[in-house]
Amino acid sequence: AKRDFLRSVEAVYVATENSYTSFQDEIKAIEIEKQSSFIEANDDTNSILEKLQVLIKQKTETKTNIQELSNRVLDHIRVAPGISVLLDAKVFPPSMYQPRYTLVLAREAVHVITDGFTGQPSFGPPDPNKKYTSNRIRYITDNLVNLKTSSDSVNVNYNIKATTITNINDAVDVPELQNSIKQKYIHEFLHK
């Protein structure tokens, strides 16, 4: 999960009631406060994970074990959960293109939203981060703070719908997402 997170870090965004920024920009802000340098090429995985833990702790004010919570987040910022969702949705072959992860952080709440293209045929260059299809999938985890142990199963709700967009970044309506966070109806965003 840690290695998958490092490969996906450029596609991870952080959403709160009042902001929507890239994970990397959030980490830069933390490091400016601490007078340290941003993720260097020689930064190890543990250093980046520590920064994720600081971010979660700052934004959620949760009493939950931050290390366990961070591990739950990492479990969903990778391809494997998406394959399970696609198999459940009977999408064959189970493939997702341009995956984009949004880490939703609110007081005592953490959700992971994943957006991507799925289905066949696929269009665009061979790079899966640039391919697209005529179907978009969005899935949202339940509140990861509410899990009692790291082995508890996580409920994931999904929606697949036809689309004409070719860049998954265009699928995220930031004002709608922030409104859903403010009203504590994050699952309403599933159908947007």
Image (cartoon, grey):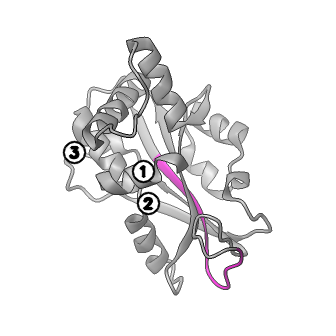
User: Magenta includes 174?
Assistant: no
Asked if the residues shown at circle 2 and circle 1 are in contact, with their CB atoms under 8 angstroms apart, the answer is: yes
Residue for badge 3: 148
Q: Provide the residue designation for mark 1.
A: 142
Q: Which residue is mark 2?
A: 156
Label located before the other in sequence (3 or 1): 1
Estimate how packed mark 1 is, as few (under 14), some (14 to 19) or many (20 or more) residues with alpha carbons within 10 Å.
some
CB atoms of marks 3 and 1 within 8 Å:
no
Residue 109, image x and y in percent? 42, 36
Type of amino acid at the residue the image marks with label 3 = Lys
Horizontal and vertical percent for residue 173? 72, 45
Span highlighted in magenta in the image: 112-124
Inspect the image, locate mark 2, and give the three-letter code of the amino acid beneath it: Val
Label 2 Cα neighbours within 10 Å, binned few <14 / some 14-19 / many ≥20: some
The secondary element bearing badge 1 is classed as: loop
Decide which of tag 2 and tag 1 comes sooner along the chain.
1
State the image coordinates of residue 30 (x, y, percent, origin top left). Answer: 43, 21
- Of the 4 image quadrants, the one containing the C terminus is bottom right
> In the image, what residue occupies the spot 32% across and 37% down?
43
**Secondary structure of residue under mark 2:** strand
Q: Amino acid at mark 1?
A: Asp
Residue located 29% across and 34% down the image: 47
Question: Is 106 located above or below residue 173 in the figure?
Answer: above
Measure how far apart labels 3 and 1 are at the Cα level: 13 Å
Q: Observer-nearest residue: 155 or 101?
A: 101
